[in-house]
Amino acid sequence: MLPAKPDFLIISAVDHPEAMVGELFQRKFGHPLPAWNHDVVAFFRKDDGTLVPMSYTKFAVLEPLILVGGCCTDGRAFAHMTEAQKAELTAAGGSMAQLLSYGFKRFADLCNAYFGYCGDPRAWEVDLSAGFIPTEHEKLLVHWHKPLNDQTKRALVAMAHALGPF
């Protein structure tokens, strides 16, 4: 369980993320945003009320599971923060962990489990802090948010694994 989200971190599902985070995604992944649904952005709210995009991810519904991908954070957003705000955000687990936690709650009724695919050691640690756990498959993570029997869990993991990297 993550500590409380700082008041200056605003997290929202958005319908048209391109204008807010399209350049960030392009810079991080080398291609435009995919046309998945359920985009979520974490913003840093400056003292004057201006919102600065900080972190982004997508939640793609493939019933009965959701794929979580495209996670990225814009390091330039930290230039707008005071040292005290940076420390508060770090103590709260960081913007990406808070964003993932928000998404897990927001989209809980749309799936039986969330899956992530992660090859970056730093991102892996953030994913674990947000509630993902490793599966038996390399780089494949799962977040169980509701009670499921072992047979159902195995079937969902097999389904996500069969998709390959995402």
Image: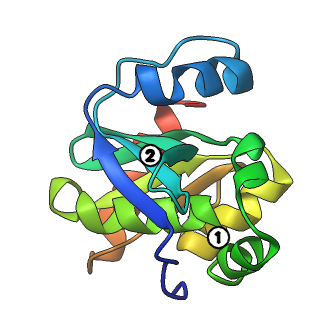
Whether residue 134 appears in this view of the structure is no
Nearer-N-terminus badge (1/2): 2
Q: Could you say where residue 128 lies in the image, as x and y percent from the top left?
A: 64, 70
Q: Could you say where residue 144 lies in the image, as x and y percent from the top left?
A: 39, 71
Outermost residue to the top: 31
| Residue at the image point whose x is 54% and y is 84% from the top | 2
| Residue at the image point whose x is 27% and y is 75% from the top | 148
Assess whether mark 2 and mark 1 are in contact (beta carbons under 8 angstroms): no
Q: Which residue is mark 2?
A: 41
- Mark 1 surroundings: few (<14), some (14-19) or many (≥20) residues within 10 A: some
Q: Is residue 131 above or below residue 63?
A: below
Q: Which residue is mark 1?
A: 128
At label 2, the amino acid type is Val
Q: CA distance from mark 1 to mark 2?
A: 19 Å
Dot 1: element: helix
At label 1, the amino acid type is Leu
* 43 left or right, relative to 81: left
Outermost residue to the front: 48
Q: Based on the displayed image, in which of its 4 quarters is residue 97 positioned?
A: bottom right
